[in-house]
Image (cartoon, rainbow, N blue to C red):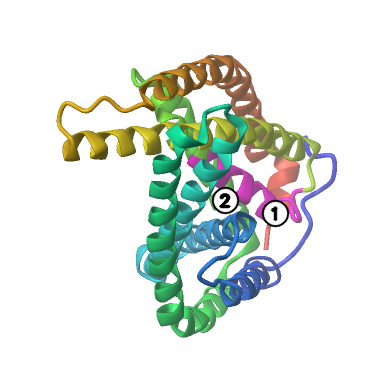
Amino acid sequence: MLEHPARRFNTMDLLFTAYQKKVSSLNLHLDKITADCDIELLHHLRVEIKKIRVIFHLLEILEPEKFDEKYWYADYRKIFKYAGLVRELQLSIKALEKYHVSQRRILPFKKFLLREEKTTHRKLFSFVEKKKIKLLQKPERKIRKICSNIKTRDFILKTFAYILSETDKISNLINSSAGLENVHKIRQNLKSVVAVIGMIQPIIPSDELASASRKIKVIDNLIGSYRDHCVLVNDLARFIKIREEKNPGHISSLESFSVSIKHENDFLLKRLEPKIKTNLKIILQNLTRFITLQLNEDSFQKNCTG
């Protein structure tokens, strides 16, 4: 049962205001995009885009005939992709600092990463400069109109249905034969769940929802650390392959380094496995149970009318 009754609100106050705030914050970050912006700026830029995508997705769920998420998100998706590629290269460059490998051996790889980063950074900067005005003209009037017509009850019920759908997807990914090979997809869905919980908490101020969100964020951070390490492994493998294609029969001096970081990657994955296969399953089960109970509560049905 809810610790507090569902608060009365309208979607104009919640969803439309959230959209305005995220777009405003995103535009501030876009204004700071330069040819050499840092990791943190790119991280915050991607976070805001993820939240805007969740809002777009909710709007499509609420009014599928009036809002097309894929159409309105297209330019954001490209910025998200470019920013992600630049950030991954920056993370690989930074990660090299913690390994005790001679600069002579590692320098060609580092130069390769710096060249890749510079090229991708230019693409990001060029695309942002080209599309920034269009992004500022995103569908504010359309979203305002949709939000003004959505009933509280419909918003809550469809949002809960979305969370249940996402938790079901995550459970299927965990239980699939691919297992933790799906870890990136698992993380993407976890982020969507956390974002939507954050959206609905002003209406449903529940300790259970807050607790689920906190615990999911802990696991999300663990997956993030593992994923960052995977990026370095993949970048190094790509570099070695390019060198071998240019010099057939050449054995890279970084082969032993490649083997050692792969072993480290395997170790990180083994540490992560019980967190996902046991802890995360329990968190999702509790969240599903809580939402299902709320949907069956008479008091909940009364409180979310309007």
Residue closest to the eye, 267 or 138 = 267
- Label 1 sits on residue: 304
Contact between labelled residues 2 and 1, with CB atoms less than 8 Å apart: no
Q: What secondary structure is found at the residue carrying circle 2?
A: helix
Q: Residue furthest front?
A: 104
* Disc 1 packing (10 Å; few <14; some 14–19; many ≥20): many
**Residue 86 visible in the picture:** yes
Residue lying at the far right of the rendered structure: 4
Q: Is residue 187 above or below residue 111?
A: above
Which residue is at a point 66% across and 47% down the rendered structure image?
Answer: 197
Residue 213 drawn at (x, y percent): 69, 39
Residue range (magenta): 188-204
Left or right: 299 as drawn, with respect to 267: right
Quadrant housing residue 23: bottom right
Side (left or right) of 245 relative to 291? left
* Residue 188 percent location from the top left of the image: 49, 42
Tell me the CA gap for discs 1 and 2: 12 Å
Picture coordinates of residue 13 (x, y %)? Answer: 71, 71
Q: Residue at x 47, y 16 (%)?
A: 263
Q: Which of the two discs, 1 and 2, labels the residue nearer the N terminus?
A: 2
State the residue in front, 78 or 265: 265
**Amino acid type of the residue tagged 1 in the rendering:** Cys
Residue positioned 47% across, 55% down in the render: 86
Is any atom of residue 68 visible in this view? no
Main SS, magenta region, reads helix
Q: Which residue is mark 2?
A: 159
- Considering the image in quadrants, where does the C terminus appear? bottom right
